[in-house]
Amino acid sequence: MSDSLFVRYLSHVRDALRRIVPDLPDEVAARVELTPTRDPAHGDMATNAALLAAKIARRRPAEIAADLAAALAGVPGVAKAEPAGPGFVNVTLDAAVLRSIVPAVLGAGESYGDAALGQGVRVNVEYVSANPTGPMHVGHCRGAVVGDALANLLAKAGYGVTKEYYINDAGAQVIALAWATYWRYLQVIGTTMGQEEFAALVPGGIQYGGDYLVPVGRALAEAHGTALAEPGAQPAAPEHWLPTVKSFVVAQMMAMIRQDLDALGVRHDVFTSEAKILADGITDRAIARLDAQGLLYEGVLEPPKGKLPEDWEARPQTLFRSTAFGDDVDRPLRKSDGSNTYFANDIGYHDDKIRRGADLLIDVWGADHGGYVTRMKAAVKALGKDGGTVDFDVLLCQIVRIVRDGQPVRMSKRAGTFVTLRDLIDEVGRDAVRFTMLTRKADAQMEFDLDQVVAQTRDNPVFYVQYAHARCRSVLRAAQEMLGAQDVAPATLAQAALDGIESDAELALLRRIAQWPRTVEGAAQAHEPHRIAFYLGELAGDFHTLWNRGRDDATLRFLQEDDLAATRAKLALVEATATVIRSGLAVLGVTPVEEMR
């Protein structure tokens, strides 16, 4: 577990502030921050401590900042502390403190940056949860990557993480899929009925016409022969075949989805079936518990403004008092036919996750579900756990627009109307897909430029970061030939004297490495895995800058044939850089390449 410089010196800041303002409340001290400066000319770190303490001390922030700077100047490892602006204090560390990061990284390896932030907290991250009605498409891809990277990030921050997929196998869409599959089955066994004639029998018509159902129909025929049809390969009554076909096609679609996810490097710990949640009575028990709390009643909702949602009906119905928990209207739990609304089923599912022991629930949804967030948060608050509440967060992922030469792209042949995830992976590779999906905040719209993500330029973020790692590995391979493998081993380099690391470019790289543990904790607390991709881009930029400086300044080159001590120090810095890049890429689920081809 790494010792963050920011945590260490934040403790010094708070101690000094308490000496200056003895009656400082703990809650104010907890809000004191120590953050990296944007400009190295302003030091390594800056604190807002004086601004927060001014009201309590009844003094001007600038006066407290001056006293705080004087106190921090005497802290071991602080080269300089200066008041700045309206009440900030800038802190510059001794170069020796920055150099001490290198052996810490080399000693910890890729676990550098691991944190205890979530120790003892069990978090369930549910993501993808695509309806099992066809192959995964690009619309599912962003949520899959964001959810998987977030789960990895939380695990690195010390949380006990369960990765979960919710199989929506109990709704009307799965019934529609079963009808479409049955049509493919009838075709295989030789029906004389035309498609239009069959479609007239289907509630709502045939909704899933993609060629991906052809092999499913063939497999169904291989498994059941003609037993699911009337003589002459004519349709039988739905009760004769629908349960069998529905379970068969869901299993086939989930196998296809798992293959797609595997190609993306996404693996879940738990797959939960909506149909099983209902069959086991979990939803009924959750709703009964809400009823026992007086949170259900019979009523008639006012028609909402604008477009009417499909679950609204102008009739007396069972309503959940979601307004008691921050929602804008109460929500129906039963449809006119007596069946559950989607919301009711989701209440049962989220209660199941809570009862399995989750302390924190995180759902990753598409942005089109944004209107659903408030009611679900209300339900989770009401369900509670052990007499208290359960933390719940929803990440919304905006759509991704696939473009080439600035124009929208449709690559799919078998799916019919959308770009499949497998198409995208086959086109540009898994690493490019995963990294690129994390180069924007999840709720920001993005264009996935097929030309850019395969270009070997700094405008391609995944190339830029992987190239930095490949350059590190290239240096270390050359060093092995020069010094021998033992002298370049991380354990050996961790013992190197580092006094020779003193240039501005080298110290800038060290400052960036020092930010890694803080970045992990901040990204985990905010549930924002894209911060890791941003950090890696900045770290790669610092390394490339140092590499390029070495072209003009021979003293900055990593291999110094006439100075082995300097060479070992520089190699230790290179190894530390590569280690942190690998640590970050592991969170994103991206491969650290050894060399660029």
Image (tube, rainbow, N blue to C red):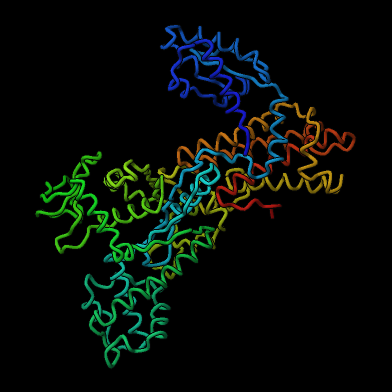
Q: Residue furthest front?
A: 386
Residue 518 vs 163, above or below: the answer is above
The image quarter containing residue 508 is top right
Q: Residue at x 53, y 43 (%)?
A: 158
Residue 381 vs 238, above or below: the answer is above
Q: Residue at x 52, y 39 (%)?
A: 531
Is residue 402 in sight in this rendering? Answer: no
Residue 582 vs 103, above or below: the answer is below
Residue placed most toward the observer, 479 or 455: 479
Give the tally of numbered discs: 0
Across and down, in percent, residue 251 comes to: 41, 72
The image quarter containing residue 252 is bottom left
Q: Residue furthest right?
A: 562
Residue 267 vs 388, above or below: the answer is below
Q: Is residue 333 left or right of residue 462?
A: left
Residue placed most toward the observer, 135 or 344: 344
Residue placed most toward the observer, 546 or 333: 333
Across and down, in percent, residue 504 comes to: 71, 26
Q: Is residue 281 left or right of residue 540?
A: left
**Position of the N terminus by quadrant:** top right
Residue placed most toward the observer, 215 or 209: 215
Q: Residue at x 21, y 77 (%)?
A: 200
Across and down, in percent, residue 444 comes to: 41, 43
Q: Is residue 431 left or right of residue 260?
A: right
Across and down, in percent, residue 69 comes to: 58, 12
Q: Residue at x 47, y 41 (%)?
A: 528
Is residue 36 in sight in this rendering? Answer: yes
**Position of the C terminus by quadrant:** bottom right
